Amino acid sequence: MTGRYYDGTSAYKIEQYEIYTQQAEHKQEAKRKKRSAQSVIVRKKLVAAVCGVFVVAVLFLYLNVVLMQTSAQFAAVTRELDDMKMRNAELAFDVASGVDLAVVEAKAKNEYGMQRPESHQNVYVDVKQSDYAEAFTATQTRPGIVDSMINSLKAFLAYVG
């Protein structure tokens, strides 16, 4: 213990104290640099996380906007289809109520020179509902590896021989 003190007094040797204080300052500076580097890394991670959350939020909003636009387009097209169906039904009714078969026949005879078919020109076809088709549903078994090899060998020998 006498090596640390100056001439046996309670005063520290000034050289060793300066070295000690320099070492302590150096350690504190190293700790500050390490904390600073760690805080930079933490800040970078925090910024990256915030950016990631922002990108996800923007993407979510964009997808919701696209969904709303698509549903609005779908609703408009559905309304247009309903209107067209209604108009089509009205036109079909107009056509059905406006056709008089006697007028059509008179116009066909007078303007186009058409006439009704005679009895020998009519051909009647009897379509019975008992006709049906049968589907072939035989199960095929696939040959095994040994059978395939034997068949391949036979085919090769037939080709060579």
Image (cartoon, rainbow, N blue to C red):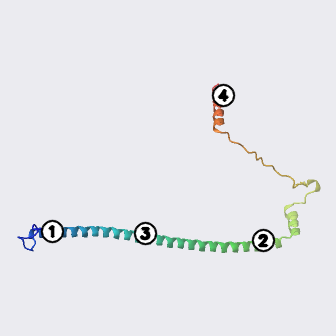
Pick the front one: 104 or 127: 127
Q: Earlier in the sequence, mark 2 or mark 4?
A: 2
Looking at the picture, which amino acid does disc 3 mark? Answer: Gly
Q: Give the residue pinned by disc 3.
A: 52
Query: What whole-number distance in Å separates the C-alpha atoms at marks 2 and 3?
Result: 59 Å
Query: What whole-number distance in Å separates the C-alpha atoms at marks 4 and 3?
Result: 69 Å
Q: Earlier in the sequence, mark 1 or mark 4?
A: 1
Q: Are there few (<14), some (14-19), or many (20+) residues within 10 Å of tag 4?
A: few
Q: Give the residue pinned by disc 2.
A: 92
- Disc number lying in front (2 or 4): 4
Query: What whole-number distance in Å separates the C-alpha atoms at marks 2 and 4?
Result: 70 Å
Q: Residue at x 89, y 68 (%)?
A: 102
Q: Give the residue pinned by disc 1.
A: 20
Looking at the picture, which amino acid does disc 4 mark? Answer: Ala
- Disc number lying in front (1 or 4): 1
Element type where label 4 sits in the image: helix
Residue 141 position within the rendered picture, expressed as x and y whole percent measured from the top left: 70, 42
Q: Residue at x 47, y 70 (%)?
A: 56
Q: Residue at x 60, y 73 (%)?
A: 71
State which quadrant residue 66 falls in: bottom right
Looking at the picture, which amino acid does disc 1 mark? Answer: Tyr
